[in-house]
Image: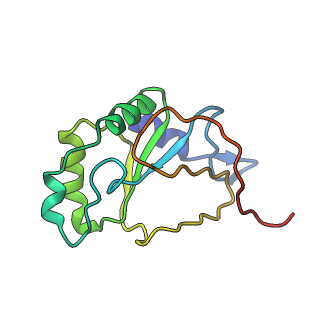
């Protein structure tokens, strides 16, 4: 799905005369993908010179571009700062990553627990990108 198509789908949603948050079509996922330690080596913000020269993990490039081609939304969500945006965009382009957007300034430190009014699923990267599989796991949720 092209960036322009995604922007159109995600904007100007109106129901009964009121603007409402858009909901993606059935089967379309909105992937938020970390960069450092997930699609390339874990490079701390304090060593930005390495951001331009690191190599992507081949399975990450292949899998993410496949998801993009299947019509899913790819957003890089990184702890890199706005000062690192240009080097990051150049690196993604150089290595052929297709994506729709990039959010900088994700909190550092891990142990994320996302609370949202929309469905959220999370997958911890453990060294290999593959197609996702379904598993039953225990999660923390709010009481009903």
Q: In the visual, does 86 lie left or right of 66?
A: left
In the picture, which quadrant includes the N terminus?
A: top left
Between 87 and 111, the one nearer to me in the picture:
111
Which residue appears at 69% of the width and 59% of the height?
Answer: 117
Which residue appears at 39% of the width and 43% of the height?
Answer: 100
Residue 14: give x, y in percent of width and height: 66, 47
48 is higher (above) or lower (below) than 35: below
Which residue appears at 42% of the width and 33% of the height?
Answer: 68
Which residue appears at 20% of the width and 45% of the height?
Answer: 55
47 is higher (above) or lower (below) than 59: below
Residue 26: give x, y in percent of width and height: 66, 33
Between 41 and 80, the one nearer to me in the picture:
41
Q: In the visual, does 59 lie left or right of 43?
A: right
138 is higher (above) or lower (below) than 127: below
Looking at the picture, the colour scheme in use is rainbow
Residue 115: give x, y in percent of width and height: 64, 65
71 is higher (above) or lower (below) than 7: above
In the picture, which quadrant includes the C terminus?
A: bottom right
Residue 108: give x, y in percent of width and height: 40, 71
Q: In the visual, does 142 lie left or right of 44?
A: right
Q: Please tell me how many numbered marks the rendered image carries.
A: 0
């Amino acid at each position: 799905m092209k960036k322009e198509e995604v922007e159109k789908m995600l904007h100007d949603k109106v129901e009964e005369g009121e603007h409402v948050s858009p909901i993606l079509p059935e089967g379309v996922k909105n992937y938020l993908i970390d960069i450092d330690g997930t699609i390339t080596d874990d490079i701390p913000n304090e060593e930005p010179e390495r951001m331009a020269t690191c190599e992507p993990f081949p399975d990450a490039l292949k899998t993410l571009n496949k998801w993009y081609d299947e019509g899913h939304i790819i957003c890089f969500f990184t702890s890199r700062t706005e000062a690192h945006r240009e080097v990051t965009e150049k690196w993604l382009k150089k290595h052929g990553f297709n994506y729709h957007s990039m959010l900088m300034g994700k909190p550092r430190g891990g142990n994320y627990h996302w609370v949202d009014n929309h469905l959220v699923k999370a997958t911890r990267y453990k060294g290999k990108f593959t197609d996702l599989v379904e598993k039953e796991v225990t999660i923390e949720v709010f009481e009903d």
